[in-house]
Image (cartoon, grey):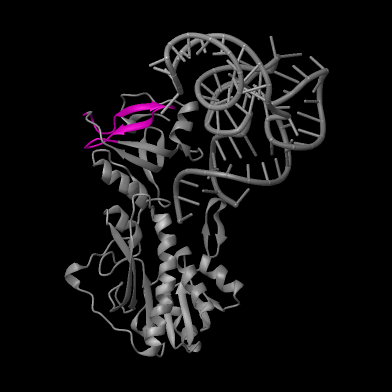
Amino acid sequence: MRIVFMGTPEFSVPSLRALIASGHQVVGVFTQPDRPKGRGGKVRMSPVKELALQAGIPVFQPLKIRKDGLEDLASLEPDLCVTAAFGQILNQAILDVPKICTVNVHASLLPRHRGSAPINWAILQDDKVTGVTTMMTDAGIDTGDMLLKREVPITDGETAGSLTETLSEVGADLLIETIQKLEAGTCERTKQNEADMSYDPMLKKDMGKLDFSQTSRALFCRVRAMNPWPCAYVECANGNLKVWSANPVSTAIKTLPGTVLSANAKDGLLVATGNGAIELLEIQAPNAKRMTAKAFLLGRSIETGIILNEATL
RNA sequence: CGCGGGGUAGAGCAGUUUGGUAGCUCGUCGGGCUCAUAACCCGGAGGUCGAGGGUUCAAGUCCCUCCCCCGCAA
């Protein structure tokens, strides 16, 4: 089959790689335009583009595929289009191009967690299980009929980053299986139950902000859900203290949430929460390197008893 | 040329303003104390101060160049 792939971040890469390996003809790749990224404003290409170039596949980077991508897409005469975290919304004109259909790989068990950050939201909401769904892309956002689904458990050790890696591989597998079934005509379509759906907004930086009046568990989930981006943080007097990893602790001590219960190299950094405490394991002070809280406390000190948000680091 | 912080012992930091003996906490090694210990006491090892060049009687510290790491903004 002639397949056009649309994707952008790291999550999309295994799917594209699997398509290439599957023997299908990947005739073109659409990805987001190169944008200034990182320090110094250097322009960087998306991970998908890197792989596409490496594989010698023509790359298209329309600002808006709906407006200026239609011609290019049509000229590729695809039998099938595949989207995986492309980052742009398709309209009916685009969807009408491929002979068969457009398949989307989505990193949640639809209809739960529609939107662009399903993995983060699954962890944030403390779901015990998530997964990947392949679906018929339609003009809505993740609203099309579902094709195949595969579950993946969420353990306490999982972060958005690690889960993204896992799900991207699962997604690649599921995509190939989906295409095989589509070709064989044995792929059933299931409508999404709108009553069970949830649409989760895009991640914003301030979603990483930790509010210690929440439960230890909720804070723990947020830390994992925001890792590696945007990263959970504590607003302090002179900037944000990023929190890369933490561990909920149950304690009988009742104090004001945010109170520093201990802050030394031996016991680590323990902060009171709404229902107990949380140990901040790996932290990063403003302008500083990421390190364990214990290492941080060897060279710098935080007074116990104060509210962490009022501390100067 | 987007703005800014930083590189000093295995780890985390101070010292740079005002050039003059390399310092702190932890770890590590040896010894002691102890029923015992990650606790306590005593002692030791461990540094081309990111790299190169320059100024100087003397540079971690001042000047120039380069490399690397990080925060913010995108």
Left or right: A193 with respect to A148? left
Left or right: A229 with respect to A214? right
Q: Residue A75, percent across and down?
A: 50, 88
Q: Residue B43, percent across and down?
A: 62, 11
Residue B68 in the image: above or below residue A105: above
- In this rendering, the count of numbered labels is 0
The range drawn in magenta is A254-277
Residue A90 in the image: above or below residue B9: below
Residue A59 in which image quadrant: bottom right
Residue A209 in which image quadrant: top left
Residue A100 in the image: above or below residue B13: below
Q: Residue at x 25, y 33 (%)?
A: A257
Residue A228 in the image: above or below residue B42: below
Is residue A262 found inside the magenta-colored segment of the image?
Answer: yes
Residue sitting nearer the eye, A269 or A37:
A269
Q: Residue at x 31, y 27 (%)?
A: A261
Residue B9 in which image quadrant: top right
Q: Quadrant of the C terminus of chain A?
A: top left
Q: Residue at x 35, y 38 (%)?
A: A235
Left or right: A207 with respect to B29? left
Q: Residue B28, percent across and down?
A: 58, 26
Residue A169 in sight here: yes
Residue sitting nearer the eye, A112 or A142:
A112
Left or right: A308 with respect to A14? left
